[in-house]
Amino acid sequence: SLIRVRVVDGTIPHPVTGRFGAAKILLIPAVSGTGIIAGAAVRAVVEVAGVRNLLTKSFGTNNPINVVKATFDALSRLRTREEAAELRGVTLE
């Protein structure tokens, strides 16, 4: 059950939201040197995924299991510019 996490320059390519149950997680890319600004559950997941700079906000429940699953949902929704262009059928210049 591994997922591929898109990491660009140590952060995620775009802001993304993940949901699981009552947990909602907002992941926001950060500039180099920011570090991981997150709670313990989210921090553990994104550190293992190889993200070095990230801002997060958690809404709803603070149940760690649901927060981790919401984080996985958010990370699985990430797309690079090239993948988004391919899905839309356009070319990047």
Image (cartoon, rainbow, N blue to C red):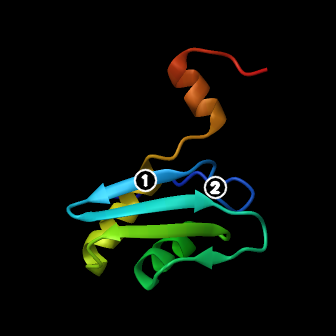
Quadrant containing the C terminus is: top right
Describe residue 62's horizontal placement relative to residue 32 as left or right: left
Q: Give the image location of residue 82, x and y in percent.
A: 64, 31
Describe residue 22's horizontal placement relative to residue 28 as left or right: left
Q: Give the image location of residue 40, x and y in percent.
A: 45, 84
Label 2 sits on a secondary structure element that is loop
Q: How many marks?
A: 2
Q: Residue at x 46, y 60 (%)?
A: 26
Q: Which residue is mark 2?
A: 7
Identify the mark nearer the N-term, 1 or 2.
Answer: 2
Q: Residue at x 43, y 51 (%)?
A: 76
Q: Nearer the viewer, mark 1 or mark 2?
A: 1
Q: Give the image location of residue 45, x and y in percent.
A: 46, 73
Note whether 59 is above or below 91 in the view shown.
Answer: below
Q: Is disc 1 surrounded by few (<14), some (14 to 19) or many (20+) residues within 10 Å?
A: some
Q: CA distance from mark 1 to mark 2?
A: 16 Å
Query: Does residue 52 appear in the picture of this structure?
Result: yes
Q: Residue at x 51, y 47 (%)?
A: 78
Q: Give the image location of residue 77, x and y in percent.
A: 44, 46
